[in-house]
Image (cartoon, rainbow, N blue to C red):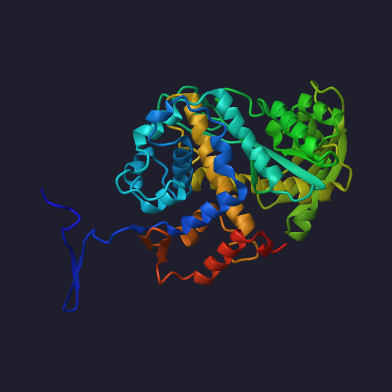
């Protein structure tokens, strides 16, 4: 039988010199920069915390791949850009991934195969998943050395398209396809909640219950923290606003247009249009009113933005219980929620949160949490290691390309494992600085 490792691969000549290749390079990896993720995990203790949430029903004497190793294998592979379980049929032999999972290099015993990882995905129950979801909140709390004065909780729903007969799939009229409707909660760039839901529901479904749980936990550890709930018009539900009013939670939430609001904004739009015709420049007029829909329990403050530009009128409405100038609240606080949409895109596009192709709904929730864990590692790397550098605002895909995808040769001895990184790597100094910060917390700039 032919040994494919020894077969020469012939390329076009370079002048008189032949160019050929083989697969005899030894212990090589294309992902050596992922050693930084291992340092991040040792700082934040994410994978161990997630593994502690999962009960393992297997008989210990018959276990080849322990649960913690499999969890690390899956999360780190997602962070490195390997989205499919099938990728692990070859990744399981990667010496670096064996190191990153803390198991160590063993040529005779690769990591878990795709079928073994699939069995893990399909045996988790709701209790384990709920515990795992709580880890992200504890990670957020642990990232603060002292109590913050204020936190802004951004809630948003998005579509997660599905293309098979997964349990819980439904057609969504707004998105015009079959999908799930996950709910995300972020505070700044830090992920707090990634909750998979069927799409046959209102966008705000369960958001009040999740907000209650978050507020209760945050006030346990930070009794004086000011909490602001922020969301688009899909979360403007009077029962949610009433709960916020009763529990000293500030809110600033979009409000969908209706006939009454259009009538209220009409004179302001006419004024903005007149000013636009005179100047040729976009015009914005801010006003406010007390408003209550027919189903609301009482009137609330509504900020009105009457805008007119080259595309015509563009009115917007925001309901809030915050004091302050209407334009400042709209521009400086409400509009900042747009950054959360970038974080969702980062997780869905770069970290494969939409790879929910299991048949069972709970298995897909587990996949969403795996993607979320990969995001937390990348975000922690950005926050702890990249602050003040040229990659301080880089998204996950850029961080992966510039910091994680580094070729290296791995050599092992009894006492040492050495990663011989590619000599032509262009960010050597930055890489060394990041590693120093991760190993020494005092090296992170404030």
Q: Position of residue 395 (x, y in %)?
A: 56, 54
Residue 156 falls in which quadrant of the image? top right
From this viewpoint, is residue 351 visible? yes
In terms of depth relative to the viewer, which is nearer, 185 or 292?
Answer: 185
Q: Residue furthest bottom?
A: 16
Q: Position of residue 75 (x, y in %)?
A: 48, 43
In the shown orientation, is residue 36 left or right of residue 18?
Answer: right
What residue do we see at 79% from left, 48% from top? 148
In the shown orientation, is residue 176 left or right of residue 192?
Answer: left
In terms of depth relative to the viewer, which is nearer, 375 or 178?
Answer: 375
Q: Quadrant of the C terminus?
A: bottom right
Q: Position of residue 299 (x, y in %)?
A: 87, 28
What residue do we see at 53% from left, 45% from top? 374
From this viewpoint, is residue 291 visible? no
What residue do we see at 84% from left, 38% from top? 223
Q: How many numbered discs, if any?
A: 0
In terms of depth relative to the viewer, which is nearer, 199 or 424?
Answer: 424
What residue do we see at 35% from left, 32% from top? 115
Is the residue 30 above or below the residue 47 in the image? below
Q: Residue furthest left?
A: 1
Q: Position of residue 15 (x, y in %)?
A: 19, 78
In the shown orientation, is residue 404 left or right of residue 329?
Answer: left
Is the residue 335 above or below the residue 230 in the image? below
């Amino acid at each position: 039988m032919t040994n494919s490792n020894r077969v020469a691969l012939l390329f076009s000549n370079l002048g008189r010199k032949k160019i050929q290749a083989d697969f005899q390079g030894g212990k090589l990896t294309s992902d050596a920069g992922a050693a930084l993720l291992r340092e991040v995990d040792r700082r934040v203790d994410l994978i161990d915390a997630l593994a502690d949430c999962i009960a393992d029903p297997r008989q210990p004497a018959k276990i080849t791949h322990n649960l913690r190793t499999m969890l690390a294998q899956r999360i780190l592979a997602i962070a490195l850009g390997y989205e499919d379980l099938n990728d692990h049929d070859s990744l399981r032999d990667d010496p670096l991934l064996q190191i990153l999972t803390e198991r160590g290099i063993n040529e005779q015993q690769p990591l878990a195969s795709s079928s073994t990882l699939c069995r893990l995905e399909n045996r988790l129950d709701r209790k384990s998943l709920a515990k795992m979801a709580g880890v992200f909140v504890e990670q957020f709390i642990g990232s603060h050395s002292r109590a913050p004065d204020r936190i802004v909780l951004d809630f948003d729903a998005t579509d997660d398209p599905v293309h098979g007969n997964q349990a819980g799939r439904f057609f969504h009229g707004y998105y015009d396809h079959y999908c799930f409707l996950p709910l995300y909660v972020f505070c700044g760039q830090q992920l707090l909640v990634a909750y998979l839901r069927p799409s046959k529901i209102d966008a705000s479904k369960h958001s009040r219950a999740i907000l209650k749980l978050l507020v209760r936990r945050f006030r346990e550890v930070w009794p004086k923290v000011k909490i602001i709930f922020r969301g688009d018009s899909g979360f403007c539900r009077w029962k949610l606003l009433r709960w916020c009013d009763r529990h000293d939670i500030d809110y600033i939430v979009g409000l969908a247009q209706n006939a009454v609001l259009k009538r209220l904004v009409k004179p302001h739009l006419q004024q903005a249009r007149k000013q636009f015709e005179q100047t040729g420049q976009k015009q914005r007029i801010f006003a406010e009113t007390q408003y209550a829909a027919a189903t609301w329990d009482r009137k609330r403050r509504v900020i009105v933005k009457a805008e007119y530009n080259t595309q015509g009128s563009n009115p917007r409405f925001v309901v809030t219980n915050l004091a302050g100038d209407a334009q400042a609240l709209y521009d400086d606080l409400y509009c900042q929620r747009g950054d959360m949409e970038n974080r969702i895109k980062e997780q869905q596009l770069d970290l494969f949160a939409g790879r929910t192709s299991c048949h069972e709904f709970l298995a897909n929730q587990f996949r969403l949490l795996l993607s979320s864990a990969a995001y937390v590692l990348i975000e922690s790397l950005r926050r702890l290691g990249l602050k003040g550098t040229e990659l301080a605002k880089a998204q996950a895909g850029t961080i992966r390309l510039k910091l994680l995808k580094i070729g290296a040769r791995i050599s092992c001895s009894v006492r040492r494992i050495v990663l011989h990184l590619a000599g032509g790597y262009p960010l050597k100094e930055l890489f060394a600085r990041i590693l120093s910060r991760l190993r020494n917390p005092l090296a992170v700039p404030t």
